[in-house]
Image (spheres, rainbow, N blue to C red):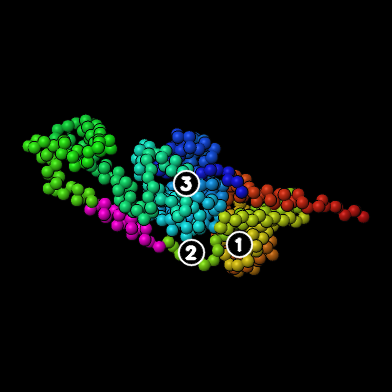
């Protein structure tokens, strides 16, 4: 299966946007080669202005990309990984999720290729420092090119990622604190706030450039600013007395220890049964009339399509039949997430009506008989065998799999032989 997109990004936050800008500004990919998903449609509307495709469907996205980049908060990782764990076709995964190890990613997505990255926030202004760790036997220049587009990149073994977190990952916060202290100190000694800010920022930038370019070690650079009995040495000696370097190192050690704790947390245990995703749809020409149904089953990157048709049926019966056929295709008890655009089929389960109907002998609240009882009974039996989560999707919209099910149903109708009316006597 040829991938529709080179890169899919799950998450449209600040870091994802910075990565996207770096890719586009450096012409690493064309916008047409990228798709981004997020639950926030306002973010997606802004992202779409860059010419990339957008989606709110992580499952569809994971089916269409050569590379899949996770750019979400780590606390959302398990939910998202579970949702695509058995349907993603992607074989190359990039993650910037803090504390989520390659081992944990593998526990959800299997034995494929992984790149774990620890970037930092200056990536937002293309001055980031990113450390890349590849899974065993994997190395990819494309991944390095992405992060070179937002600053600098080095490769390290994943065992050092938590140490990296304590330095470059969290380091911008330490530098911001030092800059803030310089500004507040400048104000205290009589400078205007704006002047103090300008002086502090350029001093830090210039000093960092000196460290970068000078052949001298840092201690020599410090001593070169100081003169015996002068002004600078007074401040430097004060910092030494207060153990400034020790305070910074102690904070980094605490940061690293917490990163170790997070990385050591065990991933949630997976269910003993298989996780399946099913999309269904039904269609009817005439209603009543010839009808068809379509089903897509997805599991561990594999996809299977089913369809069928009947003469003299209704749209509601075809919607129910599609769901039944999808569940009947499963040979063992499974955990199923089932997507349908049929409120008729889903609401009895989502609203709890199905239990009331059964208790009342398949009658509705208005005492009218429930239609299609034969199909409802089959479906209820299947929900006892499988753990099913029903999810309604908007029909004939931007959901690729729902649209494909509709195509399958209509194609099935077209295969029916034309009905020959019986002659009138």
Q: Residue at x 18, y 47 (%)?
A: 244
Farthest-out residue, front: 215
Give the residue at mark 1: 365
Main SS, magenta region, reads helix
Residues in magenta? 250-266
Counting from the top left corner in percent of width and height, residue 303 is at 61, 55
Q: Would you say residue 339 is visible in this rendering?
A: yes
Numbered disc in front, either 2 or 3: 3
Crowding near pointer 2: few (<14 within 10 Å), some, many (20+)?
Answer: few
Q: Is residue 194 above or below residue 154?
A: above
Numbered disc in front, either 1 or 3: 3
Give the residue at mark 3: 140
Crowding near pointer 3: few (<14 within 10 Å), some, many (20+)?
Answer: few
Q: Residue at x 32, y 46 (%)?
A: 168
Tag 2 near tag 3, CB within 8 Å = no
Task: State the separation of the CA atoms marked 2 and 3.
Answer: 30 Å
Give the residue at mark 2: 270
Determine which quarter of the picture holds residue 14.
Answer: top left
């Amino acid at each position: 299966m040829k991938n529709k997109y080179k890169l899919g990004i799950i998450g449209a936050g600040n870091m994802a946007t910075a990565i996207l800008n770096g890719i586009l500004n450096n012409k690493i990919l064309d916008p047409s080669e990228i798709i981004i998903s997020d639950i926030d449609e306002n973010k997606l509307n802004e992202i779409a202005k860059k010419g990339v495709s957008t989606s709110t469907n992580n499952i569809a996205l994971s089916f269409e990309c050569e590379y899949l980049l996770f750019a979400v908060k780590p606390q959302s990782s398990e939910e998202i990984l579970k949702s695509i764990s058995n349907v993603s076709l992607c074989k190359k995964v990039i993650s910037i999720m803090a504390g989520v190890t390659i081992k944990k990613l593998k526990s959800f997505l299997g034995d494929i290729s992984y790149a774990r990255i620890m970037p930092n926030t200056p990536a937002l202004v293309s001055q980031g420092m990113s450390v890349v760790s590849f899974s065993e036997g994997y190395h990819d220049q494309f991944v390095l090119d992405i992060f070179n587009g937002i600053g600098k990149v080095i490769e390290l073994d994943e065992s050092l990622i938590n140490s990296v977190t304590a330095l470059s990952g969290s380091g911008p916060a330490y530098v911001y604190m030092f800059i803030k202290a310089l500004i507040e100190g400048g104000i205290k000694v009589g400078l205007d706030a704006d002047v103090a800010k300008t002086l502090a920022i350029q001093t830090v930038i210039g000093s960092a450039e000196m460290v970068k370019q000078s052949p001298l070690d840092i201690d020599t650079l410090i001593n070169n600013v100081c003169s015996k009995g002068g002004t600078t040495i007074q401040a430097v000696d004060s910092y030494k007395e207060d153990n400034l370097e020790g305070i910074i190192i102690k904070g980094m050690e605490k940061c690293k220890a917490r990163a170790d704790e997070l990385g050591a947390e065990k991933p949630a245990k997976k269910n003993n049964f298989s996780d399946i995703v099913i999309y269904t749809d039904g269609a009817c020409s005439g209603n009543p009339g010839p009808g068809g149904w379509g089903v897509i089953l997805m599991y561990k990157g594999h996809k299977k399509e089913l369809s069928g048709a009947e003469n003299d049926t209704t749209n509601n019966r075809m919607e129910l039949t599609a769901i039944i056929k999808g569940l009947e295709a499963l040979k063992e008890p499974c955990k199923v997430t089932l997507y349908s655009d049929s409120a008729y089929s889903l609401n009895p389960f989502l609203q709890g009506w199905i239990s009331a109907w059964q208790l009342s002998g398949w009658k509705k609240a208005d005492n009218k008989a429930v239609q299609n009882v034969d199909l409802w009974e089959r479906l209820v039996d299947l929900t006892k065998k499988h753990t099913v989560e029903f999810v309604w999707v908007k029909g004939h919209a931007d959901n690729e799999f729902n649209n494909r099910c509709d195509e399958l149903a209509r194609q099935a109708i077209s295969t029916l032989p034309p009905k020959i009316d019986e002659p009138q006597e």
